[in-house]
Image: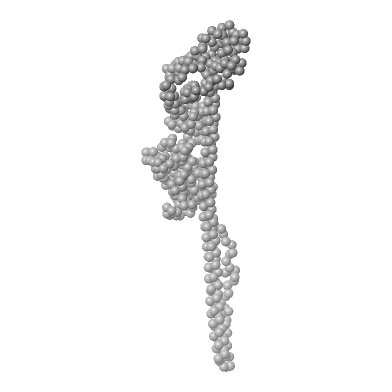
Amino acid sequence: MASSSSNRNESRRHGASAYTLSTTIPGTSASSALNCTSGSTIPTTPHDASAPSSSSSRRHVLSHINDIFKCTICFGRLDDPHLCPQCSKLYCYECIGEWLDSGISQSCPNCKITLQLDQLVKVRWFDDIQKLQQNLRTLSTSADDSQLAIQTDSGTDNERCPMHGKLVNFYCSSCKQCICEVCATDAEEGRHRDHTFKALNVTYEQHVGMLNNELEKVEHYRDKLALLINKIDRNVALIGRVKHVKQKELEAIVVSALKSLDRQEEEKLAKLRAHQNGLLHEMDDIDLKLQKMRFEMTLCSKPELIQMKSNIFSVCNAIRMNPIKDFKQIRAQTNLKIEIPHLFETGIFVVHNFSTFDDDKVYSNDFSDCLGRTWRIMAWCVISEDQFGIYLELVNGSPCWIECTFQLIHLDPEKTISKTIRQYFDKTPQKGWGLRDFVTLTTILEKNYVRDNDSLELLYNIRPCSDEPLILDADESLSEL
């Protein structure tokens, strides 16, 4: 490290002697000072033939430096870099701060050592790296533009001194003006006596470097805005997906409620029809008996009719003795209930930083079902078995049967993986509370389930169900909603 630092210092010393021209010229010796430094002014000889290859080499080195000095979390240019004291991995201070403050993990994303924000080491030498990058970038730009600069007319009006008509090739640091040789050496006029000058091309390169550095900061700021916009767009898309699932659930609830109303109506009407049919049968029987007695009365003689009186009275009394039911006993209640099944609790569980998810567990935020029980989801990566598992845990509430569906979302809806379980849950952990073999890690990586921001998106639907488990076919899962 010490040798590297000394090499950098040595390089800076050579760079200063090769490119910097800073001289204080007193009025009495301006000509001699100019003569001493005239060899360091703007070059007039064309670039060497090897310039293109040298420029390409600088670009190659610059590309490697950019690849090395990237944040391990956002993979962008480092901003206020800090490193882990254990593995020396570099992170943007904001990125590692969000990582540690999120509660997902209180450890280094790379080496997994327990880590606190105040234990991070600020990378103070990173400014030197940025200066090196800027110098390489400036050199590459100047090398690419050198031929064009040589061919450009050096005598344009905006590059000539308005007082003497000479080319401006100095920069007065005291007056902050571009001047020509006459302005710098005119002892009689003395306008720039005892001032400090620099070669114009050196000052120009310094200003270009500072401006490019500022523009890069703006570009980095813009990249952050673009990243935030992408996150918002994805959040909007996930909300739309959840809305679609809830709409399907609402449609299923309406269909179920209508079927329930039809069933209740049919049950009540069936009872009323049974009573009605019984009464109609009884009336038909009475009509037959009346018809028979009236017919017999018309055929018999007067003495026979008198003899039949007692029998007719007996039949009539028997008919009347059969009690007629009170309508209150027959009437069916006219109220119908709208039966709504338990509603699903639906949401998205995002597993962040999947590439650093190494044989570890990560939990979702707690959420409640429609009856007030509290739940959470656990994702578990088992690298040795090439498995990604998803589990449901009861955090608070009474034991119950739960129907739960997990979906691993893919940008192509046909590739979305959906699996459903029905299980009895209490607060004692059990193996059957989830899907250990939900999907293989190989499938996740090869089938592009990982988002550009290194995350997985899991949609969950849970609701209490009856104590008796219902056997579902595969096509009965919520993937059909």
Can residue 142 be seen here? no
Residue visible at 56% across and 13% down? 181
Report x, y in % for residue 84: 46, 27
Residue visible at 57% across and 75% down? 323
Task: Find residue 49 and report its image quarter.
Answer: top left
Residue visible at 51% across and 44% down? 238
For the residue pair 143 and 3, the one nearer the viewer reads as 143
Q: Is residue 405 above or below residue 224?
A: below
The figure's colour scheme reads one colour
For the residue pair 75 and 159, the one nearer the viewer reads as 159
Residue visible at 54% across and 12% down? 23
Report x, y in % for residue 268: 55, 66
Q: Is residue 134 above or below residue 334?
A: above
Can residue 216 be seen here? yes
Q: Is residue 176 above or below residue 450?
A: above
For the residue pair 172 and 218, the one nearer the viewer reads as 172
Side of 179 relative to 112 (left or right) = right
Side of 332 relative to 357 (left or right) = right
Q: Quadrant of the N terminus?
A: top left
Report x, y in % for residue 350: 49, 41
